[in-house]
Amino acid sequence: MKLICANFKMNLLKKDILNYLKTIENVRKKNLVFFPSIPYIEYFKEKNYVVGSQDISYKNFGSLTGDTSIEQLKELGASYTIIGHSERREFYNDSKYVNQKISLALKHDFKIVLCIGENLKEFESSKTLFVLKKEIDEAFSNNLDMINESNLIIAYEPIWAIGTNKIPTSEVLKSTIYQIKNYILENYNLDLKVLYGGSVNLENIEELEKISEIDGYLIGGASLSPEKFLTLINKVN
């Protein structure tokens, strides 16, 4: 069964969350992970959903105004975290903290969704694999002894596809995800699952489902409407 991760980003208010939970109350829970804004993590946990944080601080505690520590998130009920999302890398220079965040998350028994992806210029210049390998190497450095198939999942999110309704062709996706898996297997002896993220929606999910290399999805905008999200996940095997 494929893993489906719903990343709400900085969206929805309390009334929306309560309506969301009411709408999806009969949905299967086994392969779903929700990543709401931090104030709403407990709402999902109370309904016995698996829940994660959209990011963590690179330090456990300290004078870091605005950060949330992994121990605080654990108390709220989170057991997953997204690390290295392109928005964090672009707007908060997060690439330099990815390695530390992974180390901290693994030490606290969190499961990690590690985002990697290239921008449009890099894609058009045929530098996709160079960028992906670099991000993988930077993330795995010093953490390899703690990473295993059950605690780290790769999310391939081409940056140019996020929120644009444009996605790579099936041939490109199939090849890229195969090469991600093969690179990690050959260089780190790990057989990791790879999710796809970037404008996953009702219009393309059936085509994406034909790509056997995809182990699940990290879904942004299409997860914000509970009705549309229910329809979408029912199309995933």
Image: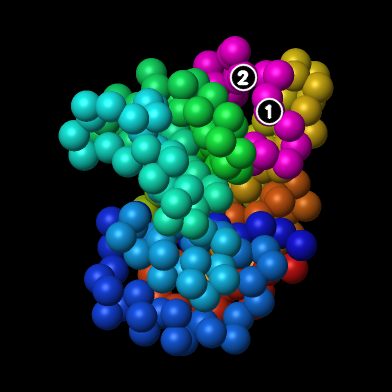
Q: Amino acid at mark 1?
A: Ile
Residue 193 lies, in percent from the top left, at: 71, 42
Q: Between residues 149 and 86, which one lies in front from this camera angle? A: 149
Seen as rendered, the residue at the extreme top is: 142
Q: Amino acid at mark 2?
A: Asn
Does the magenta portion include 153? yes
How far apart marks 1 and 2 lie (CA) works out to 6 Å
Q: Tell me what residue is drawn at x 44 percent, y 80 percent.
A: 21
Q: Is residue 36 above or below residue 26?
A: above
Decide: few, some or many residues near mark 2? Use Cα within 10 Å; few <14, some 14-19, many ≥20: some
Q: Which residue is mark 2?
A: 143
Does the magenta portion include 187? no
The secondary structure type at the circle numbered 1 is loop
- Tell me where the magenta segment starts and ends, as one range: 129-155
Could one spot residue 85 in this view of the protein? no
Q: Could you tell whether 61 is left or right of 103 in the image? A: left
The secondary structure type at the circle numbered 2 is loop
Mark 1 near mark 2, Cβ–Cβ under 8 Å? yes
Q: Is residue 212 above or below residue 82?
A: below
Q: Which residue is mark 1?
A: 147
Seen as rendered, the residue at the extreme left is: 65
Which numbered tag is attached to residue 133? none
Could one spot residue 38 in this view of the protein? yes
